[in-house]
Amino acid sequence: MAAEKVYRASTTAPVNIAVVKYWGKRDAKLNLPTNSSLSVTLSQSDLRTLTTASCSASYPASEGDSLILNGEAADVAGARTQACFRELRARRAALEAADPSLPKLSVLPVRLVSENNFPTAAGLASSAAGFAALVRAIADLYELPASPSELSLIARQGSGSACRSLFGGYVAWRMGDAADGSDSLADQVAEASHWPEMRAVVLVVSAAKKGVSSTSGMQQTVATSGLFQERITNVVPRNMEAMEKAIKERDFAAFAEVTMRDSNSFHATCADTYPPIFYMNDVSRAAIRAVEAINTAAGRTVAAYTFDAGPNAVIYYLEKETEAVVGTLYRTLGEIDGWKAVTTQSLNSSVSLDEGIAGILKAGVSRVIMTGVGEGPIKTEEYLVAEDGSPVKR
Amino acid sequence: MAAEKVYRASTTAPVNIAVVKYWGKRDAKLNLPTNSSLSVTLSQSDLRTLTTASCSASYPASEGDSLILNGEAADVAGARTQACFRELRARRAALEAADPSLPKLSVLPVRLVSENNFPTAAGLASSAAGFAALVRAIADLYELPASPSELSLIARQGSGSACRSLFGGYVAWRMGDAADGSDSLADQVAEASHWPEMRAVVLVVSAAKKGVSSTSGMQQTVATSGLFQERITNVVPRNMEAMEKAIKERDFAAFAEVTMRDSNSFHATCADTYPPIFYMNDVSRAAIRAVEAINTAAGRTVAAYTFDAGPNAVIYYLEKETEAVVGTLYRTLGEIDGWKAVTTQSLNSSVSLDEGIAGILKAGVSRVIMTGVGEGPIKTEEYLVAEDGSPVKR
């Protein structure tokens, strides 16, 4: 075959966990939300997607665009993925039209290979990192002069929360009000370096079975919850304002209260959906009681829980409170996987949880993930597509 | 001792289970609610309190008012109970002032003996039946010419939901707006005979431990839930109107939907409380899924769940749907106590529940109570205080 050049670009992208939740679409096709949201980007050394985008005239046109995810062929025909390809190609085509010397990459099939460094079993929303990496990698492949906010507009169409994974640190997704979604994008509230002490421990809870998908769940909530309008009209705007202030002032107690209240409010609107949607289970609720016990013992707020569309508990805390927070959880869950060095001191200073709560956690938490605030997508020379265009075996 | 006459009056009073929930006080002292509520009075052959009120000049004044509940001396010093005594005595005193020939009962100590015909362990709100019986029995002892609605004003001060147990059938508690609570009382939406086919099966769920008391829980919700105002301002008024219409028209599908939506909305505001309040557990949620499965299998709404401030599921259905509803529950929970005759036909026509749901119910439901809509308080000649004033041993 012709030794056509294989163009490649590789990037990693992070997971983000919202502290003011996205729940509800005002436009399902464009993924336009009913409310703004705000998240913390988590460190890619613990949780990240690595994606290599490549294209070449040597790729048979018949093959079309393709994606290999965690070693298996994945579907790219979905409207969400297609929208991302379309938007990125259009921007590349515009560059090529303006500068005829550029190679015509926009007409070539794109071959994507992607890997997560965390078990999908963890039930952590990997779509955010996945679409952020896909969009960032193709934008790099196409050498688009697009800012992270511009790319967030594209990633948003792949998976709403993906738009927040184009940035590191503390990230807001502004809902916007334009019908075409042109102002519904992410911006950075603060760099990770502004408040680098933020840590998170994830209690992975084995769910009996996957609940309602968030895509259909949020639409059912919008359509049937009598309390939902109050959340998006008054509760979330208040929480967004208070959260941005808490982050700017590095006020953990305020950050924690808004985080816990917003998680409660989000799951309340799920429970008010008809029929009701329940993502949290008795193990999730035991995790809430554990956080309350940790804060009570400390005499101040040192830990904050939040739950996405599943039973896993994400617990935020500051590095200096590792002993009070991680020590207490380790004391109960020390036998499961995922712990990083826990000092004896932390065990001494830890709280002993109520037996009932400890028992429920022991029985229901399958592993922990310890991480913290981190950076946005990072360009890398590590390629999952070889120079000849073949997927790298590993 | 002097053979002074012992005056006695005995009554039974029913339990009621709300289909539009009371949650929130605008005045804690007077038990004035933040919203109206509506309940179904349950049959006293299954669930009732029997109370005998007595008074006599032979009772030592030093003894004061007393209450023996289920064989044990109970406290009557509480402000709630004292308010009921005060209100009833004032009305008796007015009668005595107007007619000097009447015996001066208002100055005598009251001796009350009370019994429930259901296990307190069942965790069913017995305070409603208890205060309704107490007020009704003393009113009869004093021969007050008061209507059930007038007495509901008094019972309300003992326990809010008790005001609804002064009536049988379908009962509304109108929140009223007077500061002194004079218009916050119960009235009957429909007699039991208007829609006598209403049945209820209670799945008694053994809770790990008693959650937040409803009295303190509802005040925490009023104070901290960002969604609560929407519930009392818009959701409940809509539900009250729709529920009264459904009852008047004997429209079970409408009755069921409002019942389930209002239970969801109430528990949603509990989950939105800070810190969150959870009365339902995984067993309660499995009961919801079971009801949904029963309705799906029937192709129409034949069952409706509702949950009070605890994990027990109360499932309403119409007598003609016993096979579809009770048959299915019996098929899963047949080994526990409380079933009334279940026909083989009902077992044949029953639905087989998802294994996960069936397993959770089997492990978590300790007994069932089968009952239905019933009458209000009934005067009886069965006395728990003997003619000589001594408590009847049984």
Image (cartoon, coloured by chain):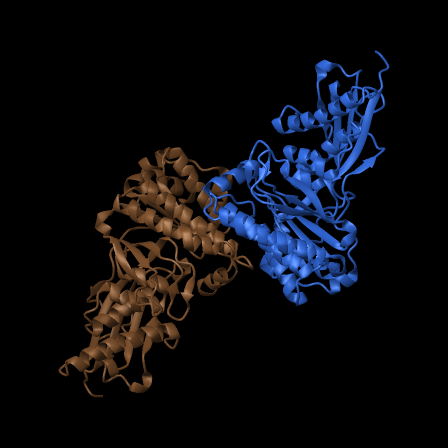
Chain colours: A blue, B brown
Q: Is residue A171 left or right of residue B221?
A: right
**Furthest-left residue in this view:** B101
Q: Residue at 26% x, 77% y: name it.
A: B89
Quarter of the picture containing the N terminus of chain B is: bottom left
Q: Is residue B82 left or right of residue A2?
A: left
Image-quadrant location for residue A153: top right
Q: Residue at 66% x, 68% y: name it.
A: A299
Which of these two is toward me, A250 or A373?
Answer: A250
**Furthest-top residue in this view:** A1
Tell me if residue B253 comes above or below residue A356 in the rendering. above
Residue B186 at x, y percent in the picture = 29, 60
Q: Is residue A289 left or right of residue B144?
A: right
Residue A256 seen anywhere in this rendered image of the structure: yes
Residue B369 seen anywhere in this rendered image of the structure: no
Q: Residue at 27% x, 72% y: name it.
A: B392
Residue B388 at x, y percent in the picture = 22, 79
Image-quadrant location for residue A293: bottom right
Q: Is residue B251 left or right of residue B235?
A: left
Residue A328 at x, y percent in the picture = 69, 59
Residue A151 at x, y percent in the picture = 71, 35
